[in-house]
Image: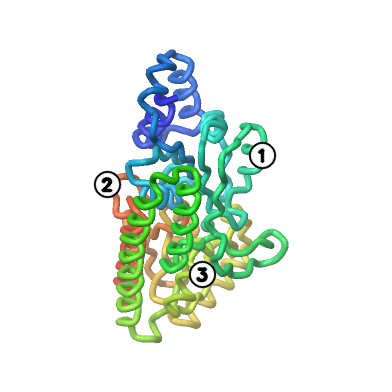
Amino acid sequence: MLEFPLRMTWVRRTAGGVGLTAVAMLFAGCATGGGDASSEAATVSGKLKVVATTTQVADFARVVGGDRVRVTQILRPNVDPHDYEPSPADVKAIGEADVLVANGVGLEKWLDGVISSAGFRGDRVDTSQGVKIRPGNGDEEKEGDPHIWHNPLNVKIMVAGIEKALAAKDPAGAAAYQANVAAYAGKLDALDADIMQQINSLPPADRKLVTNHDAFGYYVDRYQLAFVGSIIPSFDTSAELSGRDIDDLVGEIRKTGVKAIFSESSLPPNTAQTIGREAGVKVVAGEDALYGDTLGPPGSDGETYLRMEEHNTRTIVGALR
Ligand SMILES: [Zn+2]
């Protein structure tokens, strides 16, 4: 089916505020509305059908696969991945995929159910394989901290996993995939060095982070920031926040002298603004919000993984200086 991934990409890039159900219905209309199966098959020949779950791993799959693959991305920019509910279109795409690329570490709680109902028979890549996972907090997060992409050195491991899977399905493309990964690894090293230099330009006493939810642990570890706390005291954005949590965080912000609270693009900034007012510190939100769980839409500062991390670093350093 050629029409499907193409149209889905278009719908999702342009749908903006349209809800997922509406997108699914639009898609269903496209899919059942006709199309010549034989001409679709002819056009799609030669391209590996890759489905990627999150915006980050979809970006990595596009980088590694280049023009030998067609990537269908399940999550849209600025949609919270922690409580995602798959659409019928997602099930269909996964059923037809040659390779399925996932983040892993429990981020895609919906995926096992979809795989079994979709009749998926391709290869599944868990990009977290080989990454050193930070521990989780309690039973809810027993698999650990899923936000592995916020350390560019982890991303080198993630893209190597994707390369291996693509080369196994498409041996003729192995050299191309290897070259794409080698070029990208150079960019990841440069990104890592740049972030290190920018964070190190801050006075040590100012290297303190308060964010919307606990998404930046790998970044904090790699660049040696102090994590003071998060508005939602969890990796999972659906966790409840008590009045006492808010008082504790306000107290901690005052005590440590943190200069800013960072909101995230995929989460509402309201509670962050309340806490910022109470603690008397600025809240970085709106256009400047950090890209925590998802990339931004095309044309935004967060449209690729590399740009997302550059934006986050520029914003953090600018607000804490
Ligand atoms: Zn998250």
Numbered label attached to residue 217: 3
SS type, badge 3: helix
Q: Position of residue 228 (x, y in %)?
A: 51, 75
Task: Give the answer, above or below, for where 136 lies relative to 80.
Answer: below
Q: Tell me the kind of residue under disc 1.
A: Gly
Residue shown at 51% from the left, 32% from the top: 93
Q: Residue furthest front?
A: 172
Q: Position of residue 167 (x, y in %)?
A: 45, 49
**266 and 125: which is toward the camera:** 125
CA distance for labels 2 and 3 = 27 Å
Residue position for label 2 = 299
Give the label, 1 or 3, closer to the camera.
1
Numbered label attached to residue 113: 1
Q: How would you rate the neighbour count of disc 3 (Cα within 10 Å): few for under 14, some for 14-19, many for 20 or more? A: some
Q: Position of residue 158 (x, y in %)?
A: 48, 59
**165 and 112: which is toward the camera:** 165
